[in-house]
Amino acid sequence: MLNSFQFRVLRKLRHLTGLPVYYVIEIEEYGKGWYRVVDVTSQCCIRKLGSGHARDTYACIGVEDSVLMNEAEFRSWLREVLGEKYAGES
């Protein structure tokens, strides 16, 4: 589940600019340095979920529509997407 507002804004940005846009989530349950990357063109359903302060609107995306990467894979992917100059130290 992703924040629906953020996901829709990123999707609109991609539509307006034609640039590839991704939603990146750090996954701490596998330990430090794991990331799940979602292309904002992925299919999703919008749902209101949660209760109390956690109640919000979420974009629900299947895990099969994302890519799980460790830190080394993520840095390599960033270099491909952003170019060496912006991807940080090796």
Image (cartoon, grey):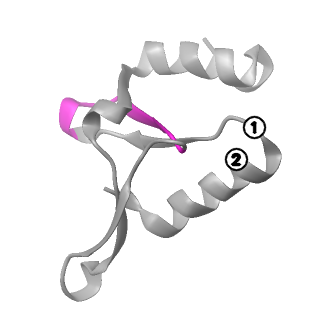
- Image coordinates of residue 59 in percent, x first then y, are 38, 60
Q: Is residue 85 magenta?
A: no
Residue 31 highlighted magenta (yes or no): yes
Residue at 41% across / 43% down in the picture? 25
Which residues are the magenta region?
A: 29-40
**How many residues crowd around disc 1 within 10 Å: few (fewer than 14), some, or many (20 or more)?**
few
What's the amino acid at mark 1?
Answer: Leu
Instruction: State whether residue 38 is above or below residue 10.
Output: above
Left or right: residue 70 compared with residue 84:
left
Which residue position is annotated with label 2?
14
Report the side of 29 relative to 77 (left or right): left
Q: Amino acid at mark 2?
A: Arg
Q: Residues within 10 Å of mark 2 (few under 14, many from 20)?
A: some
SS at mark 1 in the image: loop
Q: Please indicate, yes or no, whether residue 42 appears anywhere in the rendered image.
A: yes
Which structural element holds mark 2? helix
Residues under numbered marks 1 and 2 in contact, where contact means CB atoms less than 8 Å apart: yes
Residue 34 in view of the camera: no
Q: Residue at x 49, y 21 (%)?
A: 74
Q: Position of residue 66 (x, y in %)?
A: 37, 33
Q: Residue at x 56, y 18 (%)?
A: 77
| Residue 1 x, y percent position in the rendering | 31, 56
Figure quadrant of residue 19: top right
| Residue under label 1 | 19
Rendering quarter of residue 86: top right
